[in-house]
Amino acid sequence: MAVTLALVLVMYVRYGVAFGVTIVFLPVAIVVAALFAFGCGLWLSALNVEYRDIRVLVPFALQIWMYATPVAYPMKVIPAKYHWILLANPMTGVIETFRATLLNSAIPWTLFGYSTLFALVVTVSGAFYFRRTERQFADVL
């Protein structure tokens, strides 16, 4: 992500695109994305020790999740009746905040708040679950 972000910033300078005020919220969105990834990693690593089939399920689930997250397309191109699918995805708020900060548009605070809250819940619960199950890691492995 750092390499891609550096390339985007170089392209901004090269083509003379002005940075907006919203760019200051980009590090916050990056922290929320990292926090969510860390929480998912805690959950999945602990579950993988207990249930060996998790490692087969994760790549499949990630591929489906990628298409359900508006990375390559903005949320507004999806018909309104399907927005509930995107809104159920906790990464939608983070991705839309990335897009808003880089394009200097309005930040979707409600979506970003939902994503932040979800990331906190996943990380804290993942830490508790990992901590509770790590005592048995040596026995299982």
Image (spheres, rainbow, N blue to C red):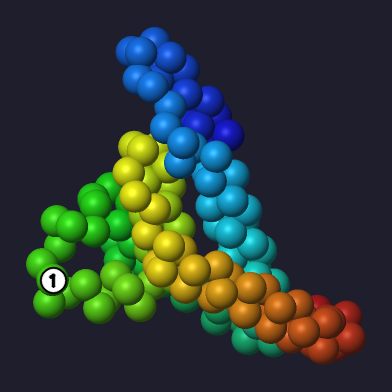
**Residue 69 picture quarter:** bottom left
- Position of residue 68 relative to residue 141, above or below, is above
- Position of residue 37 relative to residue 3, above or below, is below
Which quadrant of the figure contains the C terminus?
bottom right
x, y (%) of residue 96? 36, 54
The residue sitting at 38% across, 72% down in the picture is 89
Callout 1 amino acid: Ala
x, y (%) of residue 64? 33, 67
Q: Count the marks.
A: 1
**Residue 82 picture quarter:** bottom left
Q: Residue 40 or 34: which is nearer the viewer?
A: 34
Residue 20 in the figure: left or right of residue 43: left
Few, some or many C-alpha atoms within 10 Å of disc 1 (few <14, some 14-19, many ≥20)?
Answer: few
Residue 95 in the figure: left or right of residue 53: left
Residue position marked by numbered label 1 in the rendering? 80
Which quadrant of the figure contains the N terminus?
top right
x, y (%) of residue 78? 15, 62
The residue sitting at 62% across, 79% down in the picture is 121
Q: Residue 38 or 113: which is nearer the viewer?
A: 113
The residue sitting at 30% across, 66% down in the picture is 68
The residue sitting at 41% across, 69% down in the picture is 110
Tell me the element at label 1: helix
